[in-house]
Every structure is written in structure tokens, then in C-alpha cells.
Image: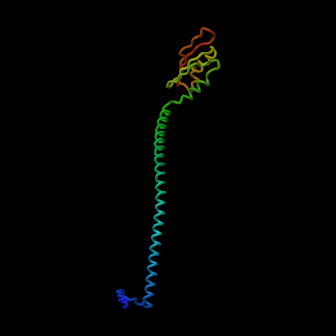
Amino acid sequence: MAGKAQKEINFLKEEESLSWSQLEKAKSIRKKSLIIVLVWVLLFAGVEGELIFLNQKFKKLRKEKTYLEGQLTRLNKKVGKILLLKERLGKVDEVISSRSNYYPPLNEFFSSVPEGVQIEEVKVNGGTIAVSGEGDILSLAQLIEIYTDTKKKSWFKGATLNSLTKQEKGLNFDFSLTINF
């Protein structure tokens, strides 16, 4: 057997030579499939790039949302404080507007006090001013004349001299006067 050449058995089809048109068709199919693969790769890369971009934008928007929610919480607290202050200021305004303005009568009274009179106490209650003090007889006479002369009434309705007593020492007198306005 060594001398005899063994015959090979091949089950494969023998290579057939392809025609020119078949080769062109195969090249065309390869080119088209390569183009399709490239288009798919580019589409996949574009979609993936867009997803990465959108993911970054989403993270940025989430951070901004968290920041804005914090700002909103702080602003809500401030708005609450502002509303509370507004309410309190409204109550203060009510109290102030319900009070009488005592500046004009007190200003009129103090501007009419003669030089020789020393005021020791002034009490304002409703529509009256209660005054006590001391002074020499001439200055007190001027003060009493101002508030008892009915022709000189301008800012007050009436006045009452409650007391006028001489001090034990010196020439001064103590007085108590009530003025109604």
C-alpha cells in the first residue's frame, strides 16, 4: 500500500469560478452592507452622544431644581415673617391712630408759661392737662390770667386753679392747675 497512491476523497464542492457579474454583485453587496453598518454605527454613536448630553443636562437641571427649592423654602419663611410684621405693624398703626395727639395742647401750654414759673409735674389724661409747680406771685398771676381770661381761650375749653399756697420759706407759691381742651 505504500506504493499505491491513495486517492483523496473530498466532499467539498470544487471551487467554481464566479462570473464577472457575480463578482460585481458581491462587491456591491459588500459595499452596501459596509455602508449600512457604518450608518448604524454613526446613528448609534449619535444617539449615545445625545443621551450623554441629555444626562449631563438632566443632572444640571436636578441640581438647579434642588437649589431653587431651597431658595423657595427660605423665601417662604421670609414671606411668613413679612406677613407677621405687616400684621403687627397694622396693629401698631391702629394703636397709634387711636391715640390722641397731645403735642398741640402741650406745645401751646409750655409756650405760654411765664419765666418765673417752674413746672414740676404735668399729667395728660384724656382731654385734660394737670399741672403742678411753683413760682413767684407775679409770674403765677400772668399764668392764671392767661387761663382764666375768657377772651384769650384759643386752644383750651377752660381752666381751673385747684390750689395756690405760699411756701413756708421764700416768696414763692405752689400751684395746681387743670386745663381742659
Measuring from the top left, give residue 4's x and y in whole percent: 36, 91
Identify the residue shown where x is 40% and y is 88%: 15
Count of numbered badges drawn on the protein: 0
**Residue drawn 53% across the image and 15% down it:** 162
Q: From this view, report whether residue 124 is shown above or below residue 94.
A: above
**Rendering coords of residue 171 (x, y %):** 63, 11
Colour convention of the picture = rainbow
Residue at the front extreme, as displayed: 2
Closer to the camera, 19 or 48? Answer: 19
Q: Position of residue 81 (x, y in %)?
A: 47, 41
Q: Is residue 171 left or right of residue 159?
A: right
Q: Position of residue 84 (x, y in %)?
A: 46, 39
Q: Residue furthest top?
A: 168
Image quadrant where one finds the N terminus: bottom left
Nearer to us in this view, 151 or 108: 108
Q: Residue at x 42, y 90 (%)?
A: 17
- Which image quarter: residue 149? top right
Q: Nearer the viewer, residue 128 or 15?
A: 15
Q: Residue lying farthest right?
A: 115
Residue 52 seen:
yes
Front residue (pair 145, 95): 95
- Picture quadrant where residue 143 is located: top right
Residue 158 visible, this angle? no
